[in-house]
Amino acid sequence: MLEALVEPLQYSFMQRSLLTAVLVGIVCASVGSYLMVQRLALLGDAISHSVLPGLALAYIVGADIFLGAFIAGVISTIVITWIRTRSQIKEDAAMGIVFSAFFALGITLITVVQKDNKIDLNHFLFGNILAVTSGDVINTAVITAIVLAIVVLLYKELMFYTFDPVGAQAAGLPTNLLDFGLMILIALTIVASLKAVGVILVLAMLITPGATAYLLVSRLHQMMILGSVIGVVASISGMYLSYFFNLPSGPAIVLVTFSFFMLAFLFSPSQGILTHPRSQASSQSKIWREIKSLIPLFKQTR
């Protein structure tokens, strides 16, 4: 057993991959907890898809793809805020409009690049953590350190704004700046996770560890800590599964994360489906009563 755990560590690419996976697990869960509490999962999806044209453009001009992705993410957040504040379009609709347009632009640019250069850029979509370089690890570590430092420094302000935005505004906090700053943190987190799980799967790492912790604990800081632990364990476990069973690394990490969520969903001491069957039965009985109440109405219309 011990030999199986040590074997992958003999290879430098696995050492880099595991370190990147640990960093991604920590930073995604820390930032994703805010998205969970604010019910803004779509925002993470919007920004993750919106970084794709930045990746493609950075590759075309020969710039750093991390920088290109970050700039595209920031531009998408500005456009979302602009549409939301200057029209009657709601935030969720603005996010759907922007991320679909940016994602379509990114796919178009990648297709053009692949036609001219005969290279495969699909790893941007699904991740390829086994191919990370030492420079990628350093970039991920720097971004993780910056994001965690900001989260720690602004923890009270972000928590106040997260749970009571009206009260935070009345108390004089710059709520618009905090909202924009949170979007920047999400963009940085997505950029840090690109090589690990890719644009499409990064939302799972942003939301699922925090959602799992949400079923187990009741406080934000506990959710962030436990979510980070879950993210790290899931990332390492996914990497080992990828190594021993020749599976794609990004999807393996996401599937392990989802497995942890299902365990919490079924067996959570406070909210589990199997550990609290009464509340589930009560919910089902309400639905059944509503269905039965619709039967007479249906008969009247016939």
Image: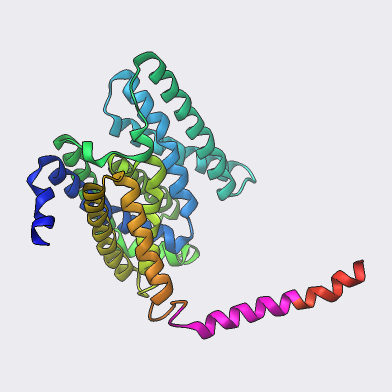
Question: In which quadrant of the rendered view does residue 129 lie?
Answer: top left
Q: Residue furthest bottom?
A: 278
Residue appearing at x 91%, y 71% in the figure: 300
Residue 158 visible in the displayed image: no
Q: Which residues are magenta?
A: 274-291
Residue 58 locus on image (x, y percent): 33, 25
Quadrant where the C terminus lies? bottom right
* Residue that appears at 28% across and 20% down: 62
Q: Is residue 139 left or right of residue 28?
A: left
Which quadrant is the N terminus positioned in? bottom left
Residue 219, above or below 151: below
Residue 145 on the magenta segment? no
Q: Is residue 44 above or below residue 70?
A: below
Which residue occupies 59% across, 46% down? 93
Given residues 70 and 248, the one toward you in this image is 248
Residue 162 point in image, percent of width and height? 42, 62
- Residue 259 shows in this picture: yes
